[in-house]
Image: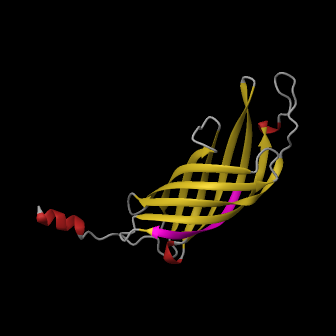
Amino acid sequence: MCFALCLNFFQAQAQRCLPGQKGIEVTAGTVNGFNSQDGFYSGIAFSQYVKSANKWKFGFDYLEKRYPYKNINIPQSQFTVDAGYYLNFLSDRHKTFFASIGASVAGGYETINWDNKLLFDGATINNQDNFLYGGALAIEVEAYLTDRILLLVTVSERLLAGSSIGRLNTTLGIGIVYIIN
């Protein structure tokens, strides 16, 4: 039994979050609360680690919020591209758990009801489709499941000017990161 304990205790771990390591991440989650019927987002991103487990991240996100009107929901859809830097502020000594805080800039496009301004009852949507610009602040927690696969939990506050409906959106998501080298 002592021998089995020693095998697990002194087990070697692969080197993680080294400068130059790259990863692909896929995330999905809710917008402005835990009710996915009100809104959701999904994204894909490329990340590259630099010194001290910090990283650069470049990604594409799709966000949709729904606004109730009589017996239908009117969608507000945003397509954004973002680039940001994440600073590692917490990790365990085995390098299996990391917490980072990051800031990013973003730009994209917003459409309301897929540019269909006339509703079923004859009402007209006055909001216009717009180009978006702004940024986000985020906290990410990563946990290694294997040497190449990480579980990601993220909370982000996005501020995007140009929107005709709402400029602030809080996203809460979960994702998977795959280290490609």
Residue 49 image offset from top left, x and y in percent: 53, 71
Q: Nearer the viewer, residue 102 or 79?
A: 102
Residue segment shown in magenta: 81-90
Residue 98 percent across, percent down from the top left:
46, 65
The residue sitting at 62% across, 34% down in the picture is: 37
Residue 66 falls left or right of residue 26: right
Rendered view: 116 above or below 160: above
Q: Is residue 83 magenta?
A: yes
* Percent x, y of residue 172: 57, 49
Residue 44 lies in quadrant:
bottom right
Q: In front here: 81 or 163?
A: 163
Residue 119 location, quadrant: top right
In the displayed structure image, the side of residue 155 where residue 111 appears, left or right: right
**Residue at the limit of the structure toward the bottom, as seen here:** 51
Is residue 68 found inside the magenta-colored segment of the image? no
Residue visible at 33% across and 69% down?
A: 13
Q: Is residue 95 above or below residue 69?
A: below
Query: Which image quarter is the N terminus in?
Result: bottom left
The picture quadrant where one finds residue 82 is bottom right
The location of residue 139, given as percent across then percent down, is 56, 60
Chief secondary structure of the magenta portion: strand
